[in-house]
Amino acid sequence: MGERGATAVSYALMVAIAVLLLSIALIVLQGGIGAALRGGGNCVELPTSAGCMPSDGGGGPGPPGPPGGSTTSSSSSTTSTSLP
């Protein structure tokens, strides 16, 4: 029973340390987390507002390709000369 008690105490200590570290991280990051959530909420409410629309050149489907999929072609030529 002694080892079980020591194991339980060590697990309880690890959980307490993890909770302490998470609490400290939330306190330190609370301003940034709040700003990100407010910005996301604003974009849900007004999707066309500043900062919500993607800038040009990113994430779009792109121009249409050739019909029937893409094809690749290559050519090769060899020239030989003989000296007299």
Image (spheres, grey):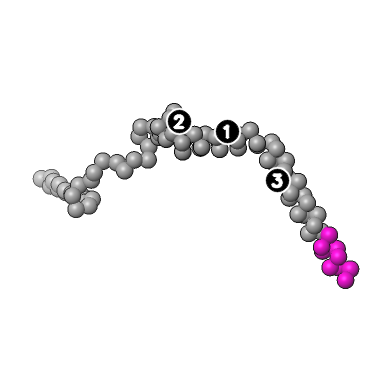
Residue receiving disc 2: 51
Query: Does label 1 or label 2 sit earlier along the sequence?
Result: 1
Which is more foreground, mark 3 or mark 1? Answer: 1
- Circle 3: element type: helix
Question: x, y percentage for residue 51?
Answer: 45, 30
Per the model, the C-alpha gap separating discs 1 and 2 is 13 Å
Quadrant of res 52: top left
Residue receiving disc 3: 22
Q: Looking at the magenta stretch, what is its main secondary structure?
A: helix
Instruction: Find the magenta span and give its range.
Output: 1-9
- Circle 1: element type: helix
Q: Quadrant of the N terminus?
A: bottom right
Quadrant of res 3: bottom right
Residue reaching furthest to the right: 2
Residue receiving disc 1: 35
Residue reaching furthest to the bottom: 1
Q: Assess whether residue 7 is covered by the magenta stretch.
A: yes
Mark identifier at residue 43: none
Query: Does label 2 or label 3 sit earlier along the sequence?
Result: 3
